[in-house]
Image (cartoon, helix red, strand yellow):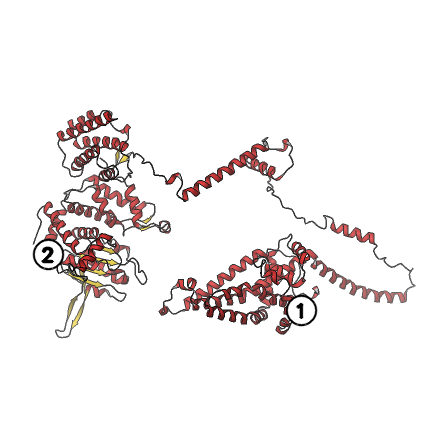
Amino acid sequence: MELEKASARLAPRSPWQTVDLGTKLYRQWAAPVLWVWLAFTLVPFGLMLGWSLLAEALWPLFLFWWLKPLWERPLLAWYSHALFAETLTLKQLFQRWRHYALPGLASQLTWRRFSPARSFNTCVWQLEGAKGEQLCQRLRALNSYPSNRAGIMTIVVLHLEQFMAMGLMVLLYTLVPWQFSLEWSDWFYDQGALQMAIASATLYLVMCVTEPLYVACGFALYLNKRTWLEGWDLQLGLTRLGRHRATRTGAGATVLILLGLMLPLPEPVSAQPAPRNEEQQQVIELLASPDYMPFEERTERQWKDRDDDSNSWLEKFWKHFFDNLDDDEQEEPSSRPFDIPDVVLWILFWALFAGLVIWLLTKVMDQLGLGRRHQAPTPVIPTHVAGMDIRRQSLPKNLRQAVEKALAANDIRLALSLMLRSALASLLRRYPVALAAGSTEQQCLRNLKATHGEPLPILYLQRLIQAWISTAWAHRPVDADAVRALLTDWEQINAEEAANA
Amino acid sequence: MTQPTTLAEAARLAQDIEHHLNQVLIGQRQVVREVLIALVSGGHVLIEGVPGLGKTLLVRSLGKVLELDFNRIQFTPDLMPTDVTGHAMYDQKSEQFRIRRGPAFTQLLLADEINRAPAKTQAALLEVMQERQITIEGKAFTLNEPYMVLATQNPLDQEGTYPLPEAELDRFLFKVLIDYPDHADETRLVNMVLDGTIRASLDVESLSPVTDAAGLKAMKALSDSVLIDDEVLDYALRIVRATRDFSGLSHGASPRASIALARASRVQALFEGRDFVTPDDVQQVARPVLRHRIQLSADAEIEGQTPETVLGRLLEQVEAPKQ
C-alpha cells in the first residue's frame, strides 16, 4: 500500500467527517461500483427471486439478504484498490474472488451476521487477512478510542434502505391508474406472488444504491482509524518533507561543489554518527510519555464540572451515594457532604428498590385482574342525588317540624323536597347503590329496585317520588294531608327499622 | 279517521301507531319510537345502520299507517340537485316552460344512502328540510304538512361517500341508530316469514291506516301543550351547553339542539301518556338529538371513544334538576 498514491487526503477526521468522505468516495465512483454490484448480485438475485416465486416462499429472498456480507466483498475490494490508483476490472475481481471473499466469511455469515460494525470489521478481515487471536487483538485495537461509530452508521443506512424501499413502493402505488382500485394494505401485508416480486425488486433497486454507499463509508472509517493510530498523515507529511529536503540538498550540493572549486578545502568533518541503541530507547520512551500520547481509556461515572458550588442538597446526597457505590475505599469523613454511614445508604437503596418492585407487582396484578382495584367496589354514598344535597348536615334536625313549617307556608314543593332528601339520605345508607350526579330520582328508584328488590322502605320511596314528580314537574301539588300521611309513614318505617336494629 | 282532541287520546293514538309499526318492523321498538317522536315534533331523521335492517320498510309502513305520501330517492354520486327537487322543462307542444316536480314533493321522503351524493345535491335538501318549500326557477312551492325527510347512511362502507356538512346534520332532529334485532326478536321474525304471517319482501299490505295527516297535526298541536317545568327546561339547556366545553368534544351542539331537545322531550312525555315533562324524558331523547351534532376531539377518537360513550359520560355528569 503506497500512501502517496491515495486519491483522498488522509487526515484524522471525526466519525461524521469520515462518513462524509465515504459518501464522497461513493459519489466519485458510483457508476463503476454499480456495475460491480450488478455483476456479482443480479444473477443470484434473479435466481432467488424466481425460486421464491416458484416455491411461494420468502426464504430464498431472505437467503439473499442474509448473504449481504458476501455481496459486499467485491465492492470493498474495488474501493480498496481504486483509492490507491489501481482500477480492478470485473475479470480481475472474479479471478481474485477467492482471496478477498473468503477470509472471515464463515463467522460473518453466522454469529457475526448481526454485528452493527460489519462494514468496519469486514475491512480488517478482508484487507489485513488476520486470523484467530491476532484478529481479535486487531479488532480490539481498532475499535478502541476514538469510537468509529460504525454501528450508528449501520443503523442509519438500514433505516435509509427501508425508507427508500417504502418510498419507492408508494411511488409505484401512486402511479397505478385509479381504475385498478388497488387496496393500499395489500402492498404491505399480502403475501401474493405479485406483491412479493414487486417488494423484492424494490428492495434490490434500493440496495443498488445503499450497499455501495455502506461499504464506502465503512472503508472510510477504517482508513480514518488507521490514520489516527498509525499516523498516516504524519508519515505522508514527513515523506513529502524528506523529498523536499532531498531536492534542496541536491541544489545545495551543486553550489557547494562550485564554491569548493573556487575556495580552499575546509577541514574534514566527521559524518553524523548513526543513532545508538540507547538513543533509540530514549526516543521510544519519549514517544510513549503522556506529552506525546495524551489518550487514555477510562470507564467511570463522573459528575459534570460546575463553575459554582450551588449544588442542591439532593444533588450532593446522590453524588455522595453514587461515589460510595463506585469506590470500595473509604473516604475521609471530612470530605463527605453528609456524615451518613454507608449502611444507611444501602438500606435506603434497597428500600427504594423493594418499593419499586412492589409497585410494579401491584401494577402487574392490576393488569391481570388480581389486584384490589378489581374487587367488587363498595358503593360510595353519594352526596347529591337528582341535584339534591342529601348530606346529613344539610338536612333539618327535626324533619316533622321543618315539613310542618313548609306546609304552613303552603309550600308543598319544599315540604316534599325535604322529605325526599331525608328519605334518600337514609335509604342510600341502608341500601347502597351506584349513582351519578346526573341520575334522576326515577333512575335512583330503578337502581334501588334492581339492586335490593322491593322492601317496604323502597316502596315508600316510590310513593314519595310519585308525589314529588306530580308536584314539581307536573305542577299538580298533592294536598297537605297527603304529605302529612307520607311523613307519618316515613316515621313509622324508621321506628320499625330502629326496633329491628 | 281518528283525530285526538285530548292528551290522553293523543297518547293512545301514539301507542296504537307504535303497535302497528312494531308488528311489521320486528325488534326495532326504540327506532320506531324515535322516528315517531321526530315525526310528531316536525323534525327530520337521519338513520344510520347497515343494510337489511328494515329502513325502507319502516318508511313505507309509516306512510301506510299514517296515510301519507311516500317517495324514495336512491342517492348516487351522479345525482343532481334537480333530480331531487325538480326543474323547469320546455314543452314543445304548448311552447311553454313546464315545472316537473321532483320526488321531494311528497310527505315522507326516504333519502337512501344520502352520503353517496356530492355536497351540492345534499344541499338541495337544505331548503326542503328547513323551510319546507322548494324553489324552482324562482318560484317557491310549499310542501304539504306533515313533511319528514328520513335519510339513511351506512356506517361501514365509507369509500366514495361524502360526509354530510354540519349545517345539514344540524337540520336533522334525530340521528337514529338502527341495529340488529336481538336473538328472540330475530327468531320471531324468521318464524313469521316461514309460516307466512308476513312476507319477506316489503309487505305493508297487511297494515291498515290508523290516522292521517290531520290526526298527526292534532297530535303535534297537543304536544305543544305538554308542560315543561323551568327546572327541567334548564336541565335540557345545561345538557346542550355542556357539549360545548366537555372533555372529549371539539365541537358542541348549537341552540337548534336546545330547541330540538325541549320539543322532543315534550313529545316523549306525550308518548308516555303524561302531560308534563320529567328529567327522564329529557335524558331519553338527549342521545338521538345530540349524537350527530357533536364532534369528538382528536384525543377522544384516538382513545377509541364514540359519541355514545362521550354522551353517556356527559349525561352522568350534568346534574339532574334541583328541587
Pair 2/1: label in front: 2
Does the rendering let one see residue B104? no
- The disc placed on residue A85 is 1
Residue highlighted by disc 2: B209
Q: Relative to A223, say whether A335 is above or below.
A: above
Name which residue type carries label 2.
Pro
Name which residue type carries label 1.
Ala
Dot 1: element: loop
For the image shown, how many numbered marks are present on the structure? Answer: 2
Q: Relative to B46, say whether B96 is above or below.
A: below
Q: Say whether mark 1 and mark 2 are on the same chain.
A: no
Q: Quadrant of residue B178?
A: bottom left
Tell me the crowding category of disc 1: few under 14, some 14 to 19, or many 20 or more residues within 10 angstroms, Cα based.
few
Q: Relative to A439, say whether B71 is above or below.
A: below
- Quarter containing the N terminus of chain A: bottom right
Does the rendering let one see residue B52? yes
Q: Residue A206, position in %: x, y?
A: 51, 66
Q: Residue A108, position in %: x, y?
A: 60, 60
- On screen, residue B168 versus residue A268, left or right, reads left
Relative depth, front residue between A469 and A27:
A469
Residue shown at the point (31%, 63%) measured from the top left: B160
- On screen, residue A415 versus residue B249, left or right, reads left
